[in-house]
Amino acid sequence: MFKRIDHIEIIPCDFERSIKFYTEILGFSIKEKMAVAAAPLEEIAYLALGDTVLELMRVQDAAISAPEPWGTGYRMMALEVEDMDAALAYLAGKGVTPSWGPVTLGSSKRAEIRDCDGFPIELRQW
């Protein structure tokens, strides 16, 4: 009945800056971008990475809410990487440093980074 997660929605503070971060640094591609006339929603962009999709939403007067890292609700998305050390070296070259880790957890490695709005992103090597 249920097949997979279709997409994850994020409301960034700066829509274009976020598109640039996800495409130029993390390698997402723009699948579709369109204006939307449904205030406060103004525009959406679907960004693809492999068979996963991230939906960025431009809304009027977007503001970052105070993070609660152990509160209920959305915590973070996770991106699988082929080689943690290579991924972290690449990101460092783009000015993105880990906010946590890397650590080895059993047979996997895990680290966290933050996007341009401070939203956490897990990196996982299996």
Image: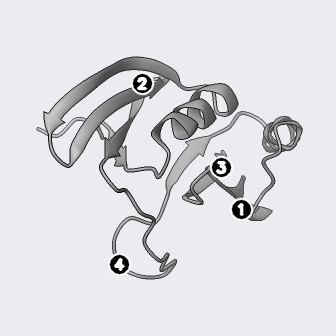
The label number, if any, that marks residue 123 in the structure image: 3
How many numbered marks does the figure carry? Answer: 4
Q: In which quadrant of the rendered view does residue 30 lie?
A: top left
- Callout 1 secondary element: loop
Q: Position of residue 82 (x, y in %)?
A: 72, 33
* Badge 3 or badge 1: first in the primary sequence: 1
- Callout 2 secondary element: loop
Which one is in front, 17 or 104?
17
Q: In which quadrant of the rendered view does residue 62 lie?
A: bottom left
Residue, x 31% and y 32% (percent of image)? 44
Q: Quadrant of the N terminus?
A: top left
Q: Are marks 3 and 1 in contact (CB under 8 Å)?
A: no
Residue, x 46% and y 40% (percent of image)? 15
* Badge 3 or badge 4: first in the primary sequence: 4
**Callout 1 amino acid:** Gly
Q: Name the outermost residue toward the front.
A: 61
Q: Position of residue 79 (x, y in %)?
A: 57, 43
Disc number lying in front (1 or 4)? 4
Return the residue at label 2: 51
* Badge 2 or badge 1: first in the primary sequence: 2
